[in-house]
Amino acid sequence: MEIADKLIQTHFLTKEEALELLAHAGNKEMAARLAQEAVKLRQSYYGNKVFIRGLIEFTNHCKNNCYYCGIRRGNGKVKRYRLTEDEILECCDSGYELGFRTFVLQGGEDPYYTDERMTALVKRIKETYPDCALTLSVGEKSRASYAQLRKAGADRYLLRHETADEKHYGILHPKEMSLAARKQCLYDLKELGYQVGAGFMVGSPGQTRESLAEDLVFLQELGPQMVGIGPFVPHHETRFAGEPAGSVELTLFLLSVIRILLPKALLPATTALGTMDSDGREKGLAAGANVIMPNLSPMKNRKQYDLYDNKISTGEEAAECLDSLKRRVATAGYRLVCERGDFAGEQFSGRT
Ligand code: SAM
């Protein structure tokens, strides 16, 4: 337990210490101690609030070929769709009615959505819903593009680094993609004043204890305002179809560790966690998460945003089920709130 105490006292881990901690990831007593501390920290900054983000998966076209992903360029079997600007605004509209005050536009890297079109879309959403935060999650772009979108009104950006281990990055991605480029994007986004979200899949093929230690070190270096982690889930049309899914238990352990390293971070209990375990979201909250991202995409397209097999797309993850989600969250001892839910720390230099 010494290593857990060290983490709790200093909120910091060297790579060697991270390796030592990860060696105990299966220790239930340690996991419980870290979860208890994680919940205490979250409580001190955010009380018992759980923030909701309305997720709009607006395109599954993608020019990238990440080997783990169901909507990668190389999957010829996926039926492609792209929402129009009006359809996206309709999603925001129904979300606003339900009480959402953050919209997350997520998609593949779709060349149709040029900087010009994205800028127009961001402006329109921010003009229509000035009291809402807008998060983008549309992959790697130049610093100039990120700057333009920020100027148009985008507040936050989610870009998981996927793995901070160079060798592991090469197992998950084709040669034209690089960890260095991914990291540069994150640093650019941060400098431009976005609230930034990094993150990774737990248990992705080739991931070692060493890779996870690198992830924890990188997160401390970057100091993101949000961290999205969820178990890897195989997709049948990828080279990793036969690989085992990531562990829910390890994901929960890492959520607690990340909460302690970055106490004010906004940490979602992800859809992948909910896919792997029907109580995954509640377990995520009990491990230190404080964000849930229900789906606001049109029902007809939900199945098509097919990142991995069995992705939940009709149940509790749906925005329409907000009331039952509220009850579930309340039963778990938390309060689902309809607020923007900004980062509670100094790193945030938001304009709105
Ligand atoms: N294109 C944007 C990007 O690259 O950040 C956003 C969309 S991308 C599909 C969103 C996230 O889905 C990725 O960051 C990845 O971690 C996750 N994802 C993709 N395939 C997955 C899988 N098989 N299991 C779990 N998560 C997966």
Image (tube, rainbow, N blue to C red):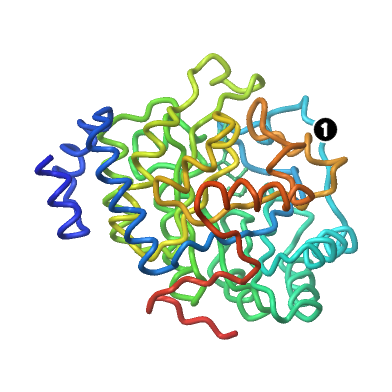
Taking the spot 56% from the left edge, 55% from the top edge, the residue there is: 140
Disc 1 marks a residue whose amino acid type is Lys
Ligand 1 within 8 Å, label 1 CB: no
Mark 1 surroundings within 10 Å by alpha-carbon count, few (fewer than 14), some (14 through 19), many (20 or more): some
Taking the spot 66% from the left edge, 48% from the top edge, the residue there is: 325
Direction left: furthest residue? 2
**x, y (%) of residue 52?**
62, 59
Image quadrant for the C terminus?
bottom right
Direction right: furthest residue? 86
**x, y (%) of residue 281?**
54, 42
From the viewer's perspective, is 117 left or right of 20? right
From the viewer's perspective, is 10 left or right of 195? left
Whether 157 is drawn above or below 57: the answer is: below
* Disc 1, SS: loop
The residue wearing badge 1 is 79
From the viewer's perspective, is 26 left or right of 94? left
Whether 141 is drawn above or below 251: the answer is: below
Foreground: 206 or 54?
A: 54
From the viewer's perspective, is 88 left or right of 102? right
Direction top: furthest residue? 242
**x, y (%) of residue 276?**
55, 29
The number of numbered badges drawn on the structure is: 1
**x, y (%) of residue 51?**
57, 61
Image quadrant for the N terminus?
top left
- The image quarter containing residue 165 is top left
Whether 53 is drawn above or below 207: the answer is: below
Foreground: 98 or 233?
A: 98
Figure quadrant, ligand 1: top right
Foreground: 269 or 120?
A: 269
Taking the spot 74% from the left edge, 66% from the top edge, the residue there is: 99
Whether 310 is drawn above or below 252: the answer is: above
